Amino acid sequence: MSLSCNIDGVPVFKSSNRSLWPVFYVINNLPLVERRKHIILHGLWFGQGKPEMTCYLQPIVNELLSLLESGLQWSLPSGETVNTSIVLDLLVADSVARPLIQQFNQFNGRHGCGFCVHEGVVVTKGLGSVRTYPVSVNIPELRTHAQCLEFAELAQLSQKAVCGVTGVSLLYLLPKFDIVNGFNPEYMHCILLGVVRQFANLWFDSVSHDKAYCLRKNIVQIDQIIFRCKPPSEIKRLPRSLSERKHWKASEWRTFLLFYSVLSIASIYAMYVL
């Protein structure tokens, strides 16, 4: 039986830095509808700041090892006893929690990508600076589980990060889990709240008003196109004006990317061409 695990921090109070870090499991063998009905709460951490990951992961790893080696016993309606081994295939975490679990540098640190060994480049942004990962002619080498384990052991001995790896994660103890491919790229922050929002701001912010690609003067027309859309029941939030986009949630940016932007930009383009 295969499991997907979800780990994330949840702020409890606005006036305090205390947070909850729940551990959820989804059984991948179940049909999609049934998976959502039978989500398993494995553990819960509560405290100030972020948990110390070695302590946090220890009971999780211990139980997963037991489920892999000894299996889970259950009975069929006929009375026959079945022993099933449990494996962890995927661990879902955002771009802040993931490097803590992997013992990697965060995305804004040197070699901060968890999937390749790109070093990154520090560039000026506003009054400060950010680390970016520009595409070069030579595609960066992809990380592998064995390579990261070697880097982790060297980092543990030297007490310094080696190619972005800061130490040995307890997840290396799980024989079936891949420390690189066992995590998925973080879609919500990277794409929806990152690239999509960045493009929208370039199109509609006043600072881009004189640029050729700026659509700020068309924002009222685009709003009218969006408001005429009748989203299906799968889309839970009604469309809001682009002038309120600083308050948009990730789900609203997803809807804008997949539905509204296609209609609105195509309509404005057709208006100019025709």
Image (cartoon, helix red, strand yellow):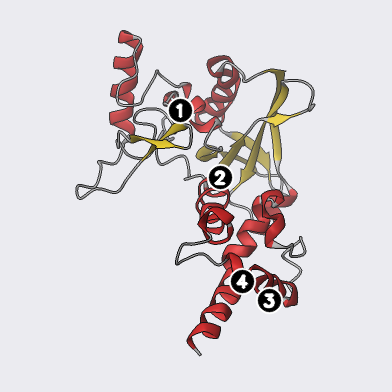
The residue pinned by badge 1 equals 102
The residue pinned by badge 3 equals 225
Looking at the image, residue 14 lies above or below residue 77: above
Q: Is mark 4 on a helix, strand or loop?
A: helix
Q: Which amino acid does label 4 sit on?
A: Asn
Q: What element carries label 3?
A: helix
Q: What residue type is labelled 1?
A: Gln
Earlier-in-chain disc, 3 versus 4? 4
Q: Distance between the residues labelled 2 and 1?
A: 18 Å
The residue pinned by badge 2 equals 189
Q: Distance between the residues labelled 2 and 3?
A: 27 Å
Q: Which residue is drawn at 57% across and 42% down?
A: 4
The residue pinned by badge 4 equals 218
Q: How far apart are marks 1 and 4 (CA)?
A: 45 Å
Q: Nearer the viewer, mark 3 or mark 1?
A: 3
Earlier-in-chain disc, 3 versus 1? 1
Earlier-in-chain disc, 2 versus 1? 1
Q: How far apart are marks 2 and 4 (CA)?
A: 27 Å
